[in-house]
Amino acid sequence: MEKLTGAEEVLEFSRADMTRIVSQRLKEDREKRGTTALLKERVDLKKKIHELEAANEGYRAANRDAVKRGILDPDEWEREWLGTPDGRICSICAGLVGARADLPSGDFDRGGGRGPPRHPRC
């Protein structure tokens, strides 16, 4: 290996430095994009949860109103947990399909609580 002159040493040092800096910045950029994507996914998930809860609370309110107005007789009708058996449903939700709850706002049997959603994206 030949000895580098002063200018060549500076040039070589600068190249190594630049490579290290660029590599570090690229790594930070990848991490930042990953973090941003993760945060977006969490926001979308929270939004989905609130949408499902709002829709189901509206359904429960409609049931309460129908019972109160005499449209639905709670001795003849009940709520049923519905699900789509399409291979994407988890074992928890699959076990709740067909669970029953008293009108107007009783809890579902089999641990279903107030009703869907047990969790989103299922």
Image (cartoon, rainbow, N blue to C red):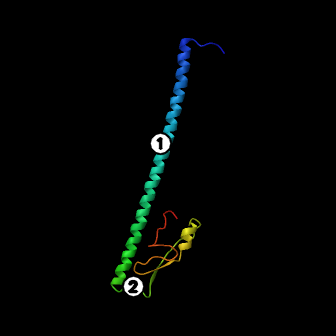
Tell me if residue 85 comes above or below residue 75 in the rendering: above
Q: Which labelled disc corresponds to residue 64? A: none
**Residue 118, above or below 16:** below
> Callout 2: few (<14), some (14-19), or many (20+) C-alpha neighbours within 10 Å?
some
Real-space Cα separation, disc 1 to disc 2, in angstroms = 54 Å
State the residue at coordinates (54%, 28%): 19
Which residue carries the number 1 mark? 32
Is residue 71 left or right of 109 when viewed as pictured? left
Q: Residue furthest right?
A: 1
Q: Is residue 63 above or below residue 31?
A: below
Work out whether residue 114 or residue 21 is closer to the camera in this orientation and state it. 114
Give the x, y percent position of residue 9.
Answer: 55, 16
Q: How many C-alpha atoms fall within 10 Å of the one at disc 1: few (<14), some, or many (≥20)?
A: few
Residue matched to label 2? 72
Image quadrant assignment for residue 48: bottom left
Q: Residue at x 47, y 53 (%)?
A: 41
What is the x, y in percent for residue 119? 49, 64
Residue ID at (57%, 66%): 90
Question: Residue 65: x percent and y percent?
Answer: 34, 80
The residue nearer to you, when weighing 66 against 100, is 100
Give the amino acid type for the residue marked by disc 1 in the picture. Answer: Lys
Residue 31: percent from left, percent from top = 50, 42
